[in-house]
Amino acid sequence: SMTVLVIACPCALGLATPISVMVAVGRAAQSGILIRQGDALQKAGQLTCVVLDKTGTITEGKPVVSAIKPTAGFSEDDVLTWAASIESGSEHPLAASILKAAEQKQIKLEKGQKFEAIAGHGVVAVINKKSVYFGNRALMDKKGLNTKKQDKQLAELSALGQTPMLLAVDNVIAGIIAVSDPIKKDSVNAVQQLQKLGVRLIMVTGDNEITAQAIAKQAGITEVKAQVLPQDKASIIKELQQQGQIVGMVGDGINDAPALAQADVGMAIGTGTDVAIESADVVILQGSLLKVPEAIALSKATVKNIKQNLFGAFFYNTLSIPVAAGLLYPFFGILLNPMIAGAAMAMSSLTVVVNASRLRWVRLGS
């Protein structure tokens, strides 16, 4: 019976899925969502868990220096000079904020040598024949430096949602520079919409636990994984998938690329790096986190529309084929004129096209 239907109504069945997908992709583009992989349009509506990067995804991604805390023997300008000099060789978003602060104070930078960026920890270099380390506590621990005297300041700054970084010059802690990155205006609304959809939300960041919890609290997220190294993000996605979760990943940086590729649906913030965008299935052009629940809503509407098309085509033709074959003739003397049959076939395809076109006006978001 299935074979008869497929042969009898190839137009309607052939149009049922691709026409809905085509209209949905166009509707997504109108809303600032670029669907790069067709499968993502179907899978997005099935997501049970969404992993969110912090910097540039939940937050603005435009950090600014919020505090400079020098230790005895160093001034604020000393700390900023050393930090900006070593960060001049880094491409990290936090580095840009420190360089900008130094530029505003018209600080002359020193040239560094043997620069090395340690993923998830910080940067090291030799400046004016002195070893300079700049990064988180894990970097200082790795270099064998004692940071107990700075514990109170680190905790206070982290509790404010700021990211504190330690500076060491020749194995002496010179001070702390704190950077703040406020959350986007629509992040809270986006999180609420995702929660209403029943999606489990996890924020993943390389920041320390206290800072991560402070930012997550502002955004309304309860599940946080902090101090995550870049290479571990993809492992977290894989672990969730092994637990039976259908996982979406939203990120914007180079460090997010492996996780975006590993996720069932990778969503890249369009204002992020090219590597992240190339690794993603969906690109959010405007950088708004609100587009994530919109993409999920569109996916569900598209799948529903495809099912309607298939049901309509099968139901319509299941009734029409027996009548066209003369089933009613022995009882009522009814036969279908070939012209009526031709019109009926055209109407079958037209119905599918019209129904798919409704996706152009589907409402996304709240």
Image: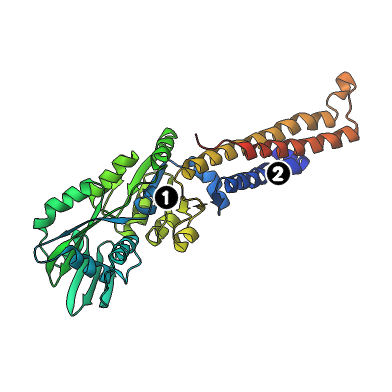
Q: Which residue is drawn at 82% across and 28% down?
A: 323
Give the mark count.
2
Secondary structure at numbered mark 2: helix
Under mark 1, the amino acid is Met
Instruction: Kindly identify the residue that appears in the image at 44 percent across and 47 percent down.
Output: 248
- Residue at x-position 37% and y-position 60%: 255
Vertical order, 295 against 111 (above or below): above
Q: In this view, does 316 lie to the left or right of 121?
A: right
The residue where tag 1 is placed is 249
Answer yes or no: is residue 99 visible.
Answer: yes
Counting from the top left corner in percent of width and height, residue 53 is at: 37, 51
In which quadrant will I find the N terminus?
A: top right
> Residue 257 bears which disc, if any?
none
Q: Which amino acid does label 2 sit on?
A: Leu
Graded by Cα atoms within 10 Å as few (under 14), some (14 to 19) or many (20 or more), the crowding at tag 1 reads many
Q: What element carries label 1?
A: strand
Q: Of residues 191 and 297, which is closer to you in this image? A: 191
Tell me the quarter of the picture where residue 298 sits.
top right
Q: Which of 349 and 282 is in front in this view?
A: 282
- Residue 70 position, x and y percent, is 15, 61
The residue under label 2 is 15
